[in-house]
Amino acid sequence: MADPVEQEPASPGDSASLDCADWWAFGVTSALTLLGYLLTLTPEVGLDWSGVLTTGAMYGGVGPPAGYPAWTLYSWLFIKLIPGSNPAWRVAVASAFAAAVSCGLIALMVSRSNKFLFNEKSSFHRLTSRDQIWIRVMSGYVAGMALGFSDDFWFEAVVADFVTFTVLLFTIVLFLLMRWMETGHVKSCRWAFFVFGLLLTNAQEMLTALPGIVCAVMLIDRKLGRDLAFLLLPVAAFVTSITQYGIWKSGFIDWPLLVAFAVPIPIAIILIIATRRLGSNWKPALACTSFFLLGFAVYLYLPIASATNPPVNWSYSRTLEGFVHLIGRGQFEHVNPANSWAEFGAELWRMTAQTGREFGWLYIIFTALPFLSLLCASCTARKWMGVLFLISICIGPLLVALLNMPDGRQAQELAETYFLPLRVPLALCTGMGLIYFATTMARLSVTSTNCETVSHFT
């Protein structure tokens, strides 16, 4: 049986195009979150890495390990384009802008999700057009604000730091995968892997998301996902072996990450048996792998920048030894994955409690509603929820096992930034749950009004 993505590609100008509700959700959420950030923005150099990062961005230098080349170029643009004030404030504006656009994209995706969460005969489509738009825009707005003004994310958005740029790149990856599902245009998938390559130059630990993304591709297009598993995963494991979060390094094997990378392979073998072929989609698989390598190759900016001898030149990366030392975060000890289920369980509970406390337990309640409605949802809706679930497992529990942060307040505060991308799928599920809830309430209200009207006339 052919995949829906292959069978029914959308044409330009059809229902796959973004409509006014999507743009309203994006524009309002981005503008209001950015306004809130600008009103609370740090006025000059702050604590932590603020001074070093600001100087590195100002001169295009080599920042702290692992260099953060994509973020450096991004912040350098803001320093050059924004007039007035000091460089630290302008870099903080770059952080605020990245956070605001992330929230806007979440709102847009929530608004867009109604296209495949509800069929044409559902109670949502029996509402008036005005009610539909209001529900979509407000649900997206609440989901974006839930992320944007969660405590630690807000803190990162108003200082000179690279964390919100990580969240922005990850959100763009999810947005491109969603657009690929809607339109059937594989170019969105290629660009998703390019942005993911950029993401790894800013957050090496996000390598844990790659097995989940490959499995997500299998859900969307099983033939492409089958070929991609055999091509991309070995290439990614090889090129990231020099990073701190590689599968192997200097005789060390990261077992949780190795198992995660191995899981898609037997699934791909099953798909070979189901489709009775292998390599039929090698061209798009090779294109996705090439785009991933192109994004990851931004690391090559570091030896070029180091050769200019900027004020911030954290490592002598113009030599191969210095470059590997910088990318591999050689002055830091290697990660020590959890080696017992009890240890992993304790870490997982601490991560869950921390996420619920910072993101908000009330919002998390609504994340369950879309999953409870999957039995009567469309095939596309089930695939999208599967995509979010698979990627969340990889950047949540798998990352917990990989980091194995010790107990203690200081360690947990340091670990907060690693799990900020996990709040993106949580916010998306919250928004979709709000759409379900608002639709149900609107339907009950209409039913109650109709019953009162009938009772009045009888």
Image: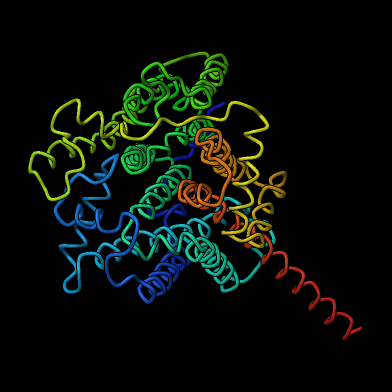
Q: Where is residue 118 in the image (x, y as percent from the top left)?
A: 63, 54
Q: Position of residue 411 (x, y in %)?
A: 51, 47
Q: Which of 243 and 198 is in front in this view?
A: 243
Position above or below: 426 against 214: below
Q: In which quarter of the image is the C terminus?
A: bottom right
In percent of the image, x 63 and y 45: which residue is there?
378
In percent of the image, x 40 and y 67: which residue is there?
30
For the image shown, how many numbered marks are present on the structure? 0
Q: In the rendered view, does 417 fall on the left or right side of 270? A: left
Q: Position of residue 285 (x, y in %)?
A: 37, 26
Q: Which of 119 and 136 is in front in this view?
A: 136
Q: Residue furthest right?
A: 458
Q: Residue furthest left?
A: 308
Q: In which quarter of the image is the N terminus?
A: top right
Q: Which of 212 and 326 is in front in this view?
A: 326
Q: In the rendered view, does 96 fall on the left or right side of 57? A: right
Q: In the rendered view, does 296 fall on the left or right side of 302? A: right
Q: In the rendered view, does 245 fall on the left or right side of 399? A: left
Q: Where is residue 209 in the image (x, y as percent from the top left)?
A: 47, 36
Position above or below: 227 against 361: above
In percent of the image, x 25 and y 28: which residue is there?
324
Residue 388 lies in quadrant: top right
Position above or below: 90 against 209: below
How is colour applied across the structure in the image? rainbow
Q: Nearer the viewer, residue 409 or 268?
A: 409
Residue 75 lies in quadrant: bottom left
